[in-house]
Image (cartoon, helix red, strand yellow):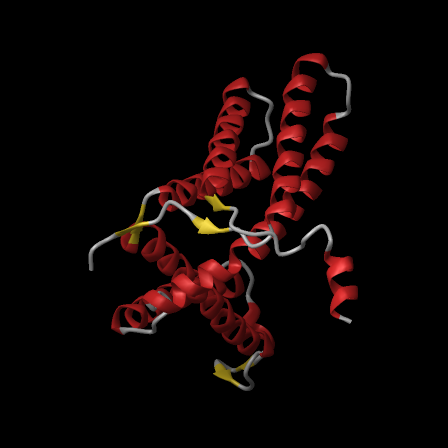
Amino acid sequence: MEKVELNKMECRYPSIFKVMWLAIVVWMVVCIANYFGHWLLPDKLDGFGMSVLFLFGVTMICCFGKGLLNLISEYDILAIDATTKRVVSIAFMVSFTVLFVISIWKMCGTTDHHSDFTRNGTVTSIPIETVFSIVGNTLKAAAFSIGIVLFYWYIRMCFILFSGRIRRISVEIALALMMMAYLSVYMNDMLVVNVTVVLIAVAFLYDIWRFADFREEHFPINWIKNMVEEE
């Protein structure tokens, strides 16, 4: 299938999108200025920014959710085909095997757990922790497999079926998630890390603004007047 170039998508609520986009920009400017001036507490500023980012994420889902659903249904992106089934089975088998080996190592590697349920070298009962371990590993492997399939569908949609600005936005989202994971483990205030975060954020804000197609206002300013006239 030939790739489809996708550079625009309908933004269902332009006013809300613009307000939240501007809030992110203002927060970024304040953070950059505070990095050199140290007027505000960084922890408080980061906490405030996390709330703004969460609201912006919800706004993006509301604004572009319908367009993404149309793309998914039109191109059958979430189809459970043979490749998807193969990905699920391989991911489940590998993850379950690894988790089961880890469980065996934890239960039998360092402590003599079998002394409680063996007598004269024979097994007298099944340890309940073994049952819980198998059930837990199965559930964890299933959750991991679902995550792998979602990641596979993400790659399929953003890098195989489509090209254009949606691909750049997908790369920027992936880089942002990687930076968040890195900073959650290795918290630091290095200039290189801060510059990288700012560059990713600026590129994403620019691309998401150009990606949004402001066709119509779904929340008109005079919506109360229109409702009264209809009555």
Count of all numbered marks drawn on residues in the image: 0
Residue furthest out toward the bottom: 124
- Pick the residue in front: 127 or 48: 48
Residue 223 lies, in percent from the top left, at 73, 57
Q: Quadrant location of the N terminus?
A: bottom left
In which image quadrant can residue 31 be found? top right
Residue 1, placed above or below residue 85: above
Residue 32 lies, in percent from the top left, at 63, 20
- Pick the residue in front: 177 or 56: 56
Left or right of 154? Residue 198 is right
Q: Quadrant location of the C terminus?
A: bottom right
The residue at 48%/36% (across/down) is 204
The residue at 41%/47% (across/down) is 8
Residue furthest out toward the top: 37
- Pick the residue in front: 191 or 99: 191
Left or right of 115? Residue 169 is left
Residue 98 can be seen in this image: no
Residue furthest out toward the front: 229
Residue 116 lies, in percent from the top left, at 60, 76
In which image quadrant can residue 188 be found? top right
Residue 183 can be seen in this image: yes
The residue at 51%/50% (across/down) is 215
Residue 116, placed above or below residue 101: below
Residue 75 lies, in percent from the top left, at 32, 65
The residue at 52%/32% (across/down) is 201
